[in-house]
Amino acid sequence: MAVRQRPFHLVVFGASGFTGQFVTEEVAREQMDPEGSSRLAWAVAGRCREKLQRVLERAAQKLGRPTLPSEVGIIICDITTPGSLDEMARQATIVLNCVGPYRFYGEPVVKACIENGTSCIDISGEPQFLELMYWKYHQKAAEKGVYIIGSSGFDSIPADMGVIYTSNKINGNY
Ligand SMILES: NC(=O)c1ccc[n+]([C@@H]2O[C@H](COP(=O)([O-])OP(=O)(O)OC[C@H]3O[C@@H](n4cnc5c(N)ncnc54)[C@H](OP(=O)(O)O)[C@@H]3O)[C@@H](O)[C@H]2O)c1
């Protein structure tokens, strides 16, 4: 399906996890329009429908948005079932992957996203995983015109700040 026609702009995979719940709440908060409903079509994904439903209900309560659970899609998807990863990737423009540890679970998600023309953002803080994905998939991702963005979020900020600090110290020449 052409990227523009996909049902969901964003899918939060692993929304039932400790971090995924915060990510879900933040997505719900950030893309709320002034009338209090969702600006973007988005979904949560994971292997247990009941858990995902509960995450949406908690976010709805916290944000005072009772309609949230009915506005957000639910996709059932398990790392151990490659077909379910393809199905999730096909429905989204961007997958926000919160399922770790990434050295065990990350690669099938990157692969499914690239094969289905979907961009992927993760919250990995695992340098070996990030390097391996770069060497194995950078060329394929470029050919498909998708972005695979690793290591976003709190844990990764000190390393990014270190790069900026060093770059500034050497006048941006590195
Ligand atoms: N960048 C940062 O700042 C930052 C901060 C915190 C954490 N992290 C990283 O984020 C990752 C998640 O951490 P967490 O503490 O949120 O972990 P967690 O609470 O254990 O959550 C793991 C998530 O993965 C899902 N999952 C596990 N196996 C799966 C499978 N076979 N198929 C589909 N989903 C599966 C779990 O689903 P169920 O609910 O069904 O079990 C759950 O939603 C870790 O790698 C951690 O290092 C990064």
Image: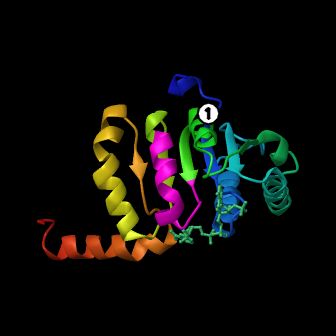
Q: In front: 110, or 149?
A: 110
Against 119, residue 152 (above or below) is below
In the image, ligand 1 is in what quadrant? bottom right
Against 146, residue 54 (above or below) is below
Reading the image, the residue beneath label 1 is 91
Quarter holding residue 99: bottom right
Quarter holding residue 139: top left
In the image: residue 168, left or right of residue 108: left
Q: Secondary structure at mark 1?
A: loop
Q: Residue at x 13, y 66 (%)?
A: 174
Q: Residue at x 17, y 77 (%)?
A: 169
Residue 101 among those drawn in magenta: yes
Residue 110 among those drawn in magenta: yes
Task: Report x, y in % for residue 83.
Answer: 60, 38
For the rendered model, the colour scheme is rainbow
What kind of residue is marked 1?
A: Gln
Our reading of the magenta stretch's main secondary structure is helix
Q: In front: 129, or 95?
A: 129
Task: Report x, y in % for residue 170.
Answer: 13, 73
Q: Residue at x 79, y 58 (%)?
A: 55
- Crowding at dot 1, Cα within 10 Å, few <14 / some 14-19 / many 20+, comes out as many
Against 106, residue 41 (above or below) is above
Q: Which residues are magenta?
A: 97-113
Q: Residue at x 36, y 55 (%)?
A: 133
Task: Report x, y in % for residue 158.
Answer: 39, 77
| Beta carbon of the mark 1 residue lies under 8 A of ligand 1 | no
